[in-house]
Image: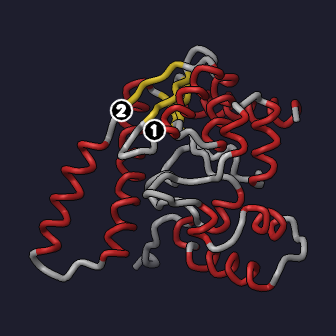
Amino acid sequence: MQDRVDQLVQWLQQQIKDAGVKGLLVGVSGGIDSAVVTNLIKRAAPDQSLGVIMPCKSNPQDMEHAQKVIERAGIDTITVDLTESHDLLFSTIVKQLDGNQTLDKAKQQLADANLRARLRMSTLYTIATNHQYLVVGTDNAAEWHTGYFTKFGDGGVDLVPLVHMTKGEVREMANFLDVPEEIINKQPSAGLWEGQTDENEMGTSYDMIDKYLKGEKIPEKDQQIIERLHRNSAHKREMAKAPESF
């Protein structure tokens, strides 16, 4: 594990040099993936790394966990509360939609959640431009394969150091990096709405996705869910499509 951490730290350092920037930043959510990335960028750029906490109607426990990650990693931090900005923008959009068509409540909830992720992306890039830093993402292999991220939201980043690591491998690295135990063991959730969890939303578990990615046998039901998620989210892993040149 030490070798793997060293390789990722060296890779991050090389990206700083290649891009001609000064350092790295990450959005710290209070979850395990962002906790691991926080520790990695602190090692890669000890004096020029930043953890950004961005509450947006967030669970107070998530904010407590994010602060614990920041304190234990010893990384510089800034907090930008996006609740008011989100409320203003989303309510403005909903008012315009309501005047033109009947609102679909389920789609409205998803749009609300995706807007939070995209506001966070915009916030990270605004701060990154000021500091001349790269934005480091937190997606692991399971999330990337199934498309469990918001396009141009938490998927809108410069670097994805964990993208080849299963959720289980991220958990092992978190233990090695001394991430607080309550963060390692908590139910994974993007915190997008009350009671939301990753696995309930996906319809399968990270354990099943990890096994699938390793080529292990899993129940047919889970395999079908994973393959459908991968197929339906293909556009998230591609550049914007363009017509062939004339």
Find disc 2 in the rendering and name its residue: 80
Residue nearest the observer in this picture, 72 or 18: 72
Quarter of the image with the N terminus is top right
> For the residues carrying marks 1 and 2, which lies nearer the camera in this image?
1
Amino acid under disc 1: Pro
Q: Is residue 207 above or below residue 153?
A: below
Query: Residue 61 location in percent, x, y?
Result: 51, 38
User: Under tag 2, what secondary structure?
Assistant: loop
Instruction: Classify residue 197 by image quadrant.
Output: bottom right
Query: Residue 204 location in percent, x, y?
Result: 69, 71
Q: Within 10 Å of the Cα at label 1, are there few (<14), some (14-19), or many (20+) other Cα atoms?
A: few
Q: Is residue 52 above or below residue 206?
A: above
Q: Within 10 Å of the Cα at label 2, are there few (<14), some (14-19), or many (20+) other Cα atoms?
A: few
Find disc 1 in the rendering and name its residue: 60
Whether label 1 touches label 2, CB < 8 Å: no
Amino acid under disc 2: Val
Identified at 67% across, 80% down, the residue is 225
Quarter of the image with the C terminus is bottom left
Query: Residue 168 location in percent, x, y?
Result: 80, 52
Q: Is residue 208 left or right of residue 104?
A: right
